[in-house]
Amino acid sequence: DGGITQSPKYLFRKEGQNVTLSCEQNLNHDAMYWYRQDPGQGLRLIYYSQIVNDFQKGDIAEGYSVSREKKESFPLTVTSAQKNPTAFYLCASSAHSGRARDTQYFGPGTRLTVL
Amino acid sequence: EDKVVQSPLSLVVHEGDTVTLNCSYEVTNFRSLLWYKQEKKAPTFLFMLTSSGIEKKSGRLSSILDKKELSSILNITATQTGDSAIYLCAVSSSNTGKLIFGQGTTLQVKP
């Protein structure tokens, strides 16, 4: 079954801790994305990667970091510098070229709560 | 600044009603407009629109793009409780290749 998996489903973080959210895809997609979703605000782009070993900041990258060492994997670290990290985090992937890259496919999300 | 605005932000209807959701955009070098449905978790892809005036249809859902008015509508006929969800509109720009999302419309269909 092709798809995108995210883990964990729920994550609780104490203030001052770094946490890492996992995202894996077996769709053979080159591009991967991380979004944050808050109530009433739609999806906001944190980071994206169009190819292995390369990634770019999105609109709200401060307090987050990513890596892209393998095509299938794009983990997101929420650092202690992120002041308001409680949110729903969505990972997505798409083909790299042409209009096909506009169609992003999403994982089931991770709900992060800061205690 | 590129932006996408959806309206209404929320809507409550009864089963069998027809609904129309709106999406307007201001995006430099528009490339495509996408609609997604989000129930509890992952947004699922509904339609991608690139050409003005050509309706895309899937069962009771249909959508059309108007490039002159910089907008799109998503129609759902004979609504069912299973249509209850957040409907997201997103637009891509050939400048950036990124998707810009609207705030979403929350639809609740009552039995």
Image: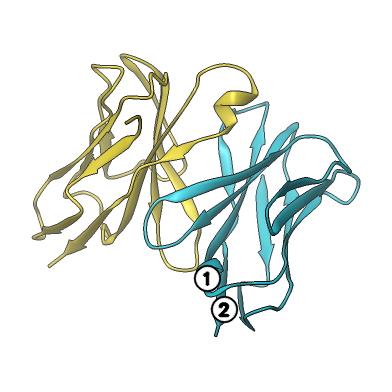
Instruction: Report the amino acid beneath label 2.
Output: Val
Quadrant position of the N terminus of chain B in the picture? top right
If the image is split into quadrants, where does the C terminus of chain B sit?
bottom right
Measuring 89% from the left and 43% from the top, which residue is drawn there? B53
* Contact? badges 2 and 1 (CB < 8 Å): yes
Q: Is residue B41 left or right of residue A114?
A: right
For the residue marked with disc 1, what is the amino acid?
A: Ser
Chain with yellow colouring: A
Circle on res. B84: 1
Please rate how many residues cluster around mark 1, counting C-alpha atoms within 10 Å: few if below 14, some from 14 to 19, many from 20: some
The residue under label 2 is B109
Closest to the observer: A95 or A15? A95
Chain B hue?
A: cyan
Q: Earlier in the sequence, mark 2 or mark 1?
A: 1
Query: Residue A38 occupies which quadrant of the picture?
Result: bottom left
**Res B105 quadrant in image:** bottom right
